[in-house]
């Protein structure tokens, strides 16, 4: 049932100044070495088969804690998209969360972090993730414009 299916979960984490927590992947990791990243991870079909759907969101929180040494709250779904590559369908689930970054402790898969404006993040080399982040930022801007229009009425 889950053959050739994968899910990625990621989280756009902003601070109160709307700067993104951007992570630079270590050069010695197998996947996407040296590229810019946001907290996230691929869940393969074997992992998915062991999880219930209501647990997947809790897995996101565990993964964030593991990657940046901190927890986020009040995250909300932001973007769901899918792609098909080499016969595998991947569903991308991106969440939005706020964090004040008092303490960041990176996992070994990341070498550095920066606080970047959305535009600065998009200018970094992030591979396919840049496209997903760009869609999410565009969606946030559209929602903000819609809210402004409602406020004007």
Image (spheres, rainbow, N blue to C red):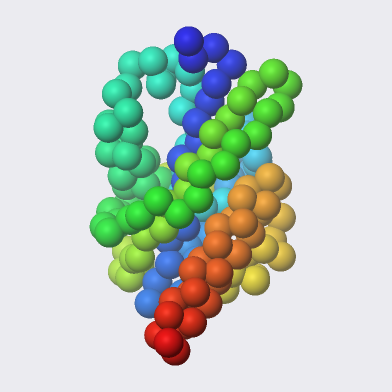
Of residues 80 and 55, the one drawn nearer to the viewer in this rendering: 80
Q: Quadrant of residue 150?
A: bottom left
Q: Residue at x 65, y 41 (%)?
A: 33
Say if 5 sits above or below 100 in the image: above
Q: Residue at x 51, y 44 (%)?
A: 80
Q: Residue furthest front?
A: 153
Is residue 91 shown left or right of residue 71? right
Q: x%, y% of residue 89?
A: 61, 25
Q: x%, y% of residue 153?
A: 43, 87
Q: Quadrant of residue 56?
A: top left
Is residue 32 shown left or right of residue 153? right
Q: Residue at x 38, y 15 (%)?
A: 49
Q: x%, y% of residue 37?
A: 57, 51
Q: x%, y% of residue 26?
A: 58, 45
Is residue 81 shown left or right of residue 62? right
Of residues 89 and 62, the one drawn nearer to the viewer in this rendering: 89
Q: Residue at x 37, y 60 (%)?
A: 97
Of residues 2 and 117, the one drawn nearer to the viewer in this rendering: 2
Residue 142 visible at all: yes
Of residues 100 and 74, the one drawn nearer to the viewer in this rendering: 74
Say if 10 sits above or below 97 in the image: above
Q: Quadrant of residue 135?
A: bottom right
Say if 65 sits above or below 115 in the image: above
């Amino acid at each position: 049932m889950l053959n050739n299916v994968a899910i990625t979960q990621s989280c756009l984490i902003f601070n109160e100044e709307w700067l993104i927590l951007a992570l630079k992947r270590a050069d010695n990791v197998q996947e996407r070495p040296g590229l810019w990243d946001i907290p996230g991870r691929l869940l393969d079909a074997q992992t998915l088969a062991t999880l219930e759907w209501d647990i997947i969101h809790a897995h996101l929180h565990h993964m964030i804690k593991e990657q940046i040494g901190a927890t986020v709250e009040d995250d909300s779904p932001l973007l769901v998209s899918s792609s098909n590559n080499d016969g595998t369908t991947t569903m991308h689930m991106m969440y939005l969360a706020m964090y004040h970054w008092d303490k960041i402790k990176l996992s070994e898969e990341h070498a550095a972090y920066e606080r970047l404006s959305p535009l600065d993040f998009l200018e970094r080399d992030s591979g396919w993730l840049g496209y997903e982040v760009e869609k999410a930022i565009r969606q946030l801007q559209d929602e903000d414009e819609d809210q402004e229009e409602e406020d004007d009425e």
